[in-house]
Amino acid sequence: MAVRIAKGDGANGWVFDDFKTADAIDWAWREGQADVLSNSWGGGPPVDVISRAFERARTKGRKNKGAVVAIAAGNADGPVNFPATIANVLAVGASNWWDERKSMTSKDGENWWGSNFGPELTLLAPGVRIATTDIHGPNGYDAGDNTLTFNGTSSATPHVAAAAALILSAVPSLNEKQVRDVITGSVDRLTADGAWNKYMGWGRLNIFAALRLARR
Amino acid sequence: MAKSSSSRGRYYYADGKKVELIPADDLIAIDEQALESASLSEAVRAALRKAMRPLSGGVGLVDRAELKDDGAEVVQALQAASATHPVFRSHGSVVVVLPEVRVEESRGAKQGRIAEWLASHATETVVKSRDEDRLVFEPKSGYGGDALDLANKLTEQVGPEMAQARFLRITPRPSTMRR
């Protein structure tokens, strides 16, 4: 289900009402019974009203097994955005076709954006030139019903959310932390020593490996 | 409680830490309903309505540069009619504070202390709703800056799990699409 939390401001911004955003998060796990919350939004200062709503989703969703929360890290090639800074969520950065962290200088050549990084980053997922459905006509990114160039950690995050949903469809008994552990424990490691770092997180999402690990 | 000017730095609490808010004096947040009672000419009111970007909760944002002579007199009239709310910048976003405070507390003893605190601030606050672990109150002034101050005061004096003024945040759209 889609839950609307923002609207355009008539200029170049999105308007969020933090109380309504928190209510929407609570609605998603409580009334909507969402198993996974995919959040391709963020920015601005941290607020407890939103952090606490995500914490309720993560601990009380799915009849107390916990809903999985994936949140985009942001696209400024700088520090991770709130709310991806919240503890124990999947903070998602973007990788490119070369399995690099998307940066201003990565091989994809898109020098106008980069994936945010920092101590909160969990993992990367593909976030450059992603094919997806699109708003029809001139309001969309492309003229038709699809686009081949959806970019950003906004496009990386749904990959991780979908992975969580697939894992839960295969093994519904897993709790929220177990799903996170499966996802982070099955990534393709991108650092020389295979360790977590603040640019790559644990590595790049590997859904097939995650499903295999979940069923073990 | 006296109305606080938006021209000085303010703060609020998140995760137990103070977060600084930088005044955005180039922007004016206007309560659309209160605008109608401000002692301004209909022409000025119409110009404000035209310049206003509607946000949420009946509040709109106006660039001060769009007002004649920096709009000092207009702002004064709006403030006198309680038609403005403070505007800040923080973490790359614009934040408008609305006159509402949400309090969350699950511990019984603390709930009692919050009730006592509200009783001792009954001249400044009005409780709008009360659920099991949550209550919402508003400053009687109807001013967002007072909501911010009251939430801080409650945090510092009682320390509930959460006392949060209502923020509208305007974040820039990401510019990640192919150029």
Image: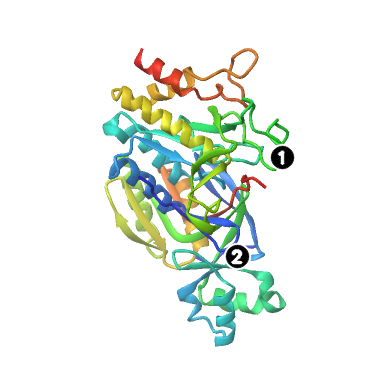
Spatial CA distance of label 2 from label 1 is: 42 Å
Question: Which label belongs to residue A89?
Answer: none
Chain bearing mark 2: B
**Relative to B170, does residue A97 appear above or below in the rendering?**
above
Mark 2 and mark 1, same subunit? Answer: no
Chain bearing mark 1: A
Kind of residue at disc 1 = Asn
Whether residue A89 appears in this view of the structure is no
Residue at image coords 59%, 62%: A11
| Residue B11 screen position, x and y as percent | 57, 50
Residue carrying label 1: A111
Scheme by which the image is coloured: rainbow
* In this rendering, position of residue A104 left or right of residue B156: right
**Relative to B37, does residue B17 appear above or below in the rendering?**
above
**Relative to A163, does residue B111 appear above or below in the rendering?**
below
SS at mark 2 in the image = loop
Q: Nearer the viewer, mark 2 or mark 1?
A: 1
* In this rendering, position of residue A108 left or right of residue A183: right
| Residue A88 screen position, x and y as percent | 46, 29
Residue at image coords 48%, 61%: B98
Kind of residue at disc 2 = Ser
**Relative to B169, does residue A154 appear above or below in the rendering?**
above
SS at mark 1 in the image = loop
